[in-house]
Amino acid sequence: MTKIFDFISSPNKRKLLYLLQAHRFTFNKDSSLQSFVKNENILGIITKGYVQIIKVDANDNRTIIEELFEEDIFGTNMSSLKNKDYDLITKEDTEIIFIDYDKIINNEDNNKAFYVQFQKNLIEILTEKIREKNERIEIITQKTIRNKLLEYFNIASKKNNSKFVYISSTFTDLADYLAIDRSAMSRELKNLKEEGLIEIKGKKIILLYNDKWI
């Protein structure tokens, strides 16, 4: 997967961040960043830590929209962060570089090789994010909890070219990501295990079925 600073040397990375007038901030675990970004048109680059973008509806139902790790990016507009129902929550101590998006578009030094590479990386990442959003739609539009889980497992398995699927956070977060009830998800996981379709070892799911069975 493309990273924002791929093929950019450390000296050129420093030059790039200087040209873009980037600012680096640190946040403690469980910090809300919504008030920090909601009125800005920015690009955020996570250099350390783990962040979730969540949506909370009028009934306080929580859905994880996106999980972001080191070198992942987010944008005010690309992630709907100006919507009051959305928030960014740090899940551990986190460091983020913020860049004014207009500086990226209108910078006069955009002909430099490292700057062109940065823009190329950014476009590739945005393309990947569109693909991931389409995959998410494929998952959450499944009619049953079972099919949502199996679709999620299939996508994760194909990405890693492995029958092992690792849950990156908690099963509660997985339920929030799939927009399903945690207890109902647990029952369906138990059913899948009893039917011999999966094994569960901690946060590792082992897929025992063949795709053609689904």
Image (tube, rainbow, N blue to C red):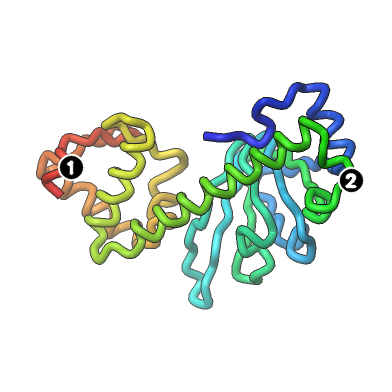
Dot label at residue 211: 1
Residue 151's x, y, as percent? Answer: 28, 51
The crowding category of the residue bearing disc 2, from other C-alpha atoms within 10 Å (few below 14, some 14 to 19, many at least 20), is few
Residue 146's x, y, as percent? Answer: 22, 56
The answer to which of 103 and 100 lies nearer the viewer is: 103
Which label sits in the foreground, 2 or 1? 2
Residue shown at 58%/43% (left/top)?
125
Mark positioned earlier in the residue sequence (2 or 1): 2
Circle 1 — which element? helix
Residue shown at 19%/39% (left/top)?
198
The answer to which of 5 and 167 lies nearer the viewer is: 5
Q: What residue would you read off at disc 2?
A: 108
Residue shown at 58%/42% (left/top)?
124
* Amino acid marked by disc 2: Glu
Residue 15's x, y, as percent? Answer: 86, 30
State the count of labels: 2
* Amino acid marked by disc 1: Asp
Dot label at residue 158: none
Residue 166's x, y, as percent? Answer: 37, 35
The answer to whether residue 171 is above or below residue 145 is above
The answer to whether residue 145 is above or below residue 212 is below
| C-alpha separation, residue under disc 2 versus residue under disc 1 | 51 Å
**Label 2 close to label 1 by CB (< 8 Å):** no
In this rendering, would 179 be left or right of 13? left
In this rendering, would 46 be left or right of 181? right
The answer to which of 171 and 65 lies nearer the viewer is: 65
Q: Is residue 175 visible?
A: yes
The crowding category of the residue bearing disc 1, from other C-alpha atoms within 10 Å (few below 14, some 14 to 19, many at least 20), is few
Circle 2 — which element? loop
Q: Quadrant of residue 201?
A: top left
The answer to whether residue 14 is above or below residue 88 is above
Q: Residue furthest bottom?
A: 58
